[in-house]
Every structure is written in C-alpha cells, then in structure tokens.
Amino acid sequence: MHEDTAAQYGLKSGDRVRIISGNGVPAEGLLLADKSVVKGAVCVAHGFGHWAYGATETEINGKKLGILKKVSGGIAINRVIPHDPTRQGKVSMLNDYWIGATCRSGVPVKVEKLR
C-alpha cells in the first residue's frame, strides 16, 4: 500500500491488517507501506499462501492433524476474489471474459487494522 494511503487510514508498515472483498472472505497479513504502489491501491503477492496442505487443522479417519506453520504463512489471494454471479458451484470466482483467467487485479477491498 502506498505510504500516503496507509497514513490516511492510520496504518504503517508492520501493522497486521485484514483485507476483505465483496465476498466477505478475509485475508490477513503484515502491511508494507512504501511509494512503490499507486495511491489508493493494495498490492498482494500472489502464490504465497494456502488454506490446505496442512495450513489448517485437518481430520483424517477421526485423527486430528495439527497445523504445519511452515506452510500456513502468506495470503491465499484466490479466496478474496469475488464470486461470479453467472457461474454456479464451488469454483465460481470472477473470471476475465476473454481469457478465462481469474480476475486478480482491480478487486475492491476494505483494509482493517488488526489489534
């Protein structure tokens, strides 16, 4: 996030924040505020987060397996992408009409400071 935008919201580098899109699924992380991101935007590195593969507690055949911290860091940004109302089912993320890829830019989000 641009440092001026962060200051407008009472945020600074190192703050723990939550971003929420229109689908209501939150993602949490540490804020880095500098001048490399356009003012008014949030930039999230893609590919550095999981909600599976040991990142959450899992139960297999009645046995609970704990969280593996080494795989649970980062933000699984696909979860923040809003749902496409024209698509049904679990995989209903908003897609680019022409190429079929999920929309990973221009997604409006709300940023909240975690306490």
Image: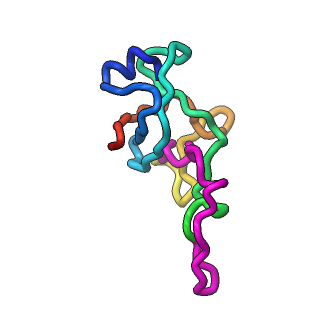
Pick the residue in front: 14 or 43: 14
Relative to 113, 84 lies left or right: right
Q: Could you say which quadrant of the image residue 18 lies in?
A: top left
Specify the segment rendered in magenta: 58-83
Determine the residue positioned at 53% across, 42% down. Answer: 94
Pick the residue in front: 93 or 5: 5
Residue 34 x, y percent position in the rendering: 50, 17
Residue 75 is at least partly visible in this image: yes
Determine the residue positioned at 55% across, 15% down. Answer: 36
Q: Is residue 61 above or below residue 16?
A: below
Q: Quadrant of the C terminus?
A: top left
Within the magenta stretch, is there residue 59? yes
Determine the residue positioned at 56% across, 63% down. Answer: 56
Residue 19 is at least partly visible in this image: no
Residue located farthest toward the front when viewing the structure as drawn: 14
Relative to 104, 24 lies left or right: left
Within the magenta stretch, is there residue 77? yes
Residue 102 x, y percent position in the rendering: 61, 40
Q: In this view, does 97 lie above or below 65?
A: above
Residue 65 x, y percent position in the rendering: 61, 74
Determine the residue positioned at 43% across, 50% down. Answer: 25
What color scheme is it? Answer: rainbow
Pick the residue in front: 52 or 95: 52
Q: How many numbered marks have been drawn onto this rendered protein structure?
A: 0
Residue 69 x, y percent position in the rendering: 61, 57
Pick the residue in front: 24 or 102: 24
Q: Could you say which quadrant of the image residue 110 lies in?
A: top left
Relative to 24, 43 lies left or right: right
Q: Could you say which quadrant of the image residue 16 lies in?
A: top left
